[in-house]
Amino acid sequence: MQLPKRAAYVVVGAGIHGLSTAYHLARELRKRNAGTGADVLVLDKAAPGAGASGIACGVVRNNYFQPAMSELMQACVEVWESDPEAYAYNPVGYIALGAARQEADLTATYERQERIGYDSELIVGADAADAHMKDLFPDWRAQGVTVCLHEHQGGFAFNMDSVRGLYEKCRSEDVSVVTGVEVTGFADSTDGTIERVETTQGTIEVGEQVVIAPGPWAKRFWKMVGMPDTIDVRTPAGEVIPDQPMWTYWNLQEGEVSIDPLLFAKADGFAPPVIHLDTDAPLFTDDGRLVTDELWGIYFKRDRHGVQGGASPLVVEDDVELDPYPSTTDIDPAFPDMWCAALSHSMSRFEGCRPLYKNARSGGVGAFTVDNFPVFDYLRPNLYAVLDSNHGYKMIGVGKEVAAVLLGEHSRLLYPFRFERFETGDLHPVSSSPYPWS
Ligand SMILES: Cc1cc2nc3c(=O)[nH]c(=O)nc-3n(C[C@H](O)[C@H](O)[C@H](O)COP(=O)(O)OP(=O)(O)OC[C@H]3O[C@@H](n4cnc5c(N)ncnc54)[C@H](O)[C@@H]3O)c2cc1C
């Protein structure tokens, strides 16, 4: 498709957020303009799903200790549930299992879910949690688990299929999606309003607003719009911590084992929920080698070719080369042993699965903000940033909220993610989870 010289709305990035924003915006504009097509343009330097959205494990869950994340996720799950077929969404549910130190967090999360009407169940106590899991999977054998949060909503979606579904929805609303065009800069007026988007194929005049949804390329765009590399962060207690790096990269460790997917089914034969297990029970490989005796965690789900999932990510010390994305070479060599040992620790059906570990296109880099939570905000008078701190495949509904904001509405759900929170100390509470995204 030819690059137009002008567009009312320019969205940069054809991942889950860029496409969802463009679709919901175009839909809303058509409704408001009595059916007239909307002038929304999406640009991507590669192709839809070429970034993190096309590699994501695809887990959709509400398990967040932070009230604002939990409420936003409830709205996102509603979007997933609105068209499971187009979004390739599997509403199989999600189970989080934790060690004693996570009981209070998971209980608080459950109580909030109950208040907001998110369908879940809490099981506390080692014997009760074990019985709940054995009911679902008779060969369940994980140790050190004292709490289980079973979310009956959520599940997972197939990453590229849902991106394609969103792309088709964009096309049905006459959104133009132009690929192979890299955005290289922005030209602004004296008050900072973006007037033109500069690309490798020419300049586009902006009629109304620009949205950036660049996934792991967030830091690059942060610089492009003149935002600082480091910021001062005020804690909720009022202490100011100076010069914190705004962006950090983590390498997400993920992989899969090639087994007959039907081997991973519930006792009733139906598809299993996504499982996230954290425990401090010692972890051994099947041949008896100690992997760790500290808190460890894995997540896994049934996939088309077997079982897929991951473990704790690794922080990357320096800037990373993101082109092409992703880099699978940085997977910790110890990861396959650990992850397969953990699968076997969970259920005896996975015993001996290590030789079936597959070096598939899995895992990749995520860009995390200074507090590990998203920034959804205007960075310029007409430039809105969707920077999800790697939380966001599941956040398909953020684009719907962003579209409303672009059209002048207030979003109660996005407000807690404004950039100003670092200055005012309105930070999100921190959980005892070992992951940067819980
Ligand atoms: C291995 C892994 C597993 C994950 N698993 C999950 C999960 O199970 N559940 C979950 O909720 N989240 C998960 N995430 C996080 C999730 O994938 C991301 O938060 C989300 O996909 C980000 O979406 P996005 O639309 O912002 O970015 P992306 O999908 O990365 O899209 C950004 C797009 O911008 C384009 N682009 C970049 N720079 C330019 C430029 N200069 N000009 C034009 N285009 C540009 C890229 O080509 C890309 O297509 C995972 C992430 C990783 C890495």
Image (tube, rainbow, N blue to C red):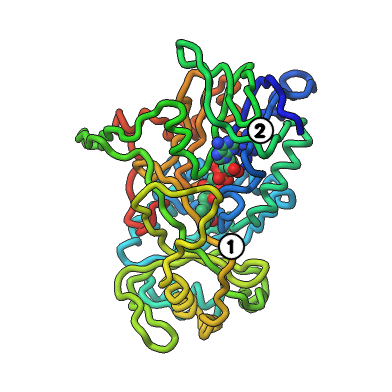
Q: Residue furthest left?
A: 239
Q: Is residue 194 left or right of residue 20?
A: left
- Foreground residue among 123 and 359: 359
At horizontal 41% and vertical 62% (from top left) the residue drawn is 312
| Mark 2: secondary structure | strand
Which residue was labeled with disc 1? 361
Give me the residue at 36% from left, 74% from top.
Answer: 144
State yes or no: discs 2 and 1 in contact (Cβ < 8 Å).
Answer: no
Q: Is mark 2 within 8 Å of ligand 1?
A: no
Q: Mark 2: give few (<14), some (14-19) or many (20+) Cα within 10 Å.
A: many
Circle 2 sits on which residue?
Answer: 42
Pinpoint residue 171: horizontal percent, then vertical percent: 76, 36
Element class at badge 1: loop
Q: Nearer the viewer, residue 6 or 175?
A: 6
| Residue 177, numbered label | none
Sequence-first tag of 2 and 1: 2
